[in-house]
Image (cartoon, grey):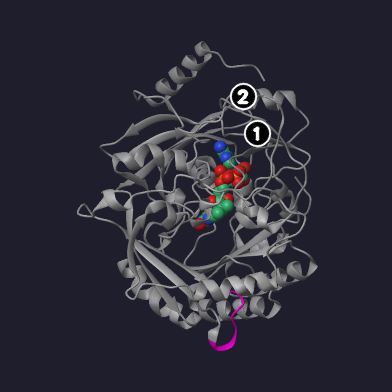
Amino acid sequence: MAHVGADAEEAVFQSFRNGLSINFQVKRGLSITRRSSRLLHYKSWGGYPSTPQTGVPLYWGQDLLVQLARYPESKVLPFGNGRSQGDVCLNGGGILVGTRSMDRFLHFDHLQGTIICESGVLLGELMEMTVPRGWFPIVTPGTRFITIGGAIANDVHGKNHHRAGSFGNQVLRLELLRSDGQRLICSPTENRSWFEATIGGLGLTGLILWAELRLRPIANPLIHQQVIRFSHLDDFFAISVDSDQDYEYTLAWVDGHATGANLGRGVLTRGNHAGFFTDSHRQVAQPALQPSFPVTLPFSLVNPWTVSLFNKFYYHKPIRKDGYSTIHYRPFFYPLDGILHWNRVYGRGGFLQYQCVVPTAHGRDAMKEILSRIAATRLGSLIAVLKIFGAVSSVGLLSFPRPGVTLAIDFPNPGPRTLELLSKLDGIVRQAGGAVYPAKDARMSPEAFHDYYPKTDRFREFIDPRFSSQFWRRIRGGNP
Ligand SMILES: Cc1cc2nc3c(=O)[nH]c(=O)nc-3n(C[C@H](O)[C@H](O)[C@H](O)COP(=O)(O)OP(=O)(O)OC[C@H]3O[C@@H](n4cnc5c(N)ncnc54)[C@H](O)[C@@H]3O)c2cc1C
């Protein structure tokens, strides 16, 4: 790929300026690693399926057109930071176009709390820019190592779905580059149908070049949290009613091995941003060193014995009497980011995460059934999370979040027993009128997908003819 020189750089920003009539202040992401232009190998976070993937990095959006001309027979797919557990970020037999080098900040209005950045900026980089200035992303998932493009394409959700909806609800506008060179500014008022197709559009409608996001004001980087142990799924529902009223953020870890009177027992965490009068200086310290899981083992360290031990330990972990404490936003939102490459504990076979949502009306019974089945097989893993989604409608035609209760749980090395279990869970979810999350999936059937996403036929009109993904071909029964 040709190196982009300073003149070209200036020309691109000139075109950004002309297109948007804003005086951009260009700044790169804070922890940039410049990628070389050679072909790179990309993986999904779950490492399953482990099809080899070839990718080319894009430094500028327009590089897409160069790569399309270079590989005229291939389908392409944007690749953010590969934090999707399943195959929505994979394109075996085609080309992945890596967006991480598109990491420039284009405008930050720190009076209004809006920011415009390229789609390869990591959420964590954005926060390094905005948090010290008193602004926070309105929606964040459980990792900050995702790109803004990836967050939009999966329409990710966070611990405050009951208040804020999903990521797409915070996007003011974005620019989409199509394979025919067409550039579309999309927003709730401009090219609205393209906006609705691209949010949650799984990277299939074209390349998102940049996005403008709404932020929320904060007084400091701290969260007042409360941790509550609950002994049954029914208690989770009872506590959630209060939590959702009084707390911006709520999430519960659940013991996926517990049965009978202990079914669905767990630990709920709820929190609000700390106010101006918090003694922030004392408590803001972050660990200087970030440990990393060093290698991928040939076997998984996650098995029914280690999971059972971990679950018992975690459920009984000491909690302060009133459960209250004040912590930095990072351990609150991103406990798993504390250990880099933690996915390696699952070994070379990788893992799958199953995340489903079932509507409130059937939620309690369906969730009991789902948890009972998982516990009976003892296949479920360390990380199982429950959350109530609220009524804020998602923007995207294929957005996953909808009102109800959602469970996300990891399954190591998806062998035949796991796949059989997950198909049975699909049956329960379909019957309850729920859905499974594509971002984490690598095995749902085309029929299940169509039940979960009834607007798929409309979505199809917006797919770029040169774009495709492993996920999409799978749920289309092998068709492009
Ligand atoms: C520890 C952990 C916790 C998580 N917690 C949550 C959670 O709480 N809630 C949640 O919703 N998800 C969660 N996830 C999933 C993760 O947030 C999403 O999969 C996210 O979309 C990944 O972003 P990415 O930049 O890595 O994109 P990738 O995984 O690389 O790609 C995701 C999709 O985005 C598309 N895409 C990427 N960039 C562009 C672009 N510029 N233009 C068009 N399409 C593009 C890709 O084609 C692909 O379809 C979690 C993942 C991990 C590892």
Residue bearing mark 2: 63
Task: Using residue 121 as the reference point, say whether residue 21 is left or right of it.
Answer: left
Q: Residue at x 32, y 44 (%)?
A: 135
Mark 2: secondary structure? helix
Between residue 247 and residue 95, name the one nearer to us. 247
Residue 366: give x, y in percent of width and height: 57, 78
Residue 148: give x, y in percent of width and height: 50, 41
Q: Is residue 259 magenta?
A: yes
Q: For the residue marked with disc 1, what is the amino acid?
A: Val
Between residue 266 and residue 476, name the one nearer to us. 266
Ligand 1 within 8 angstroms of badge 2 C-beta: no
Residue 323, placed above or below residue 137: below
Res. 117 visible in picture: yes
Q: Main secondary structure of the magenta part?
A: loop
Residue bearing mark 1: 97
Query: Mark 2 or mark 1: which comes first in sequence?
Result: 2
Q: Residues within 10 Å of mark 1 (few under 14, many from 20)?
A: many
**Residues shaded magenta:** 256-261
Q: For the residue marked with disc 2, what is the amino acid?
A: Asp
Mark 1: secondary structure? strand
For the residues labelled 2 and 1, the Cα–Cα distance comes to: 9 Å
Tag 2 near tag 1, CB within 8 Å: yes
Residue 98: give x, y in percent of width and height: 62, 34
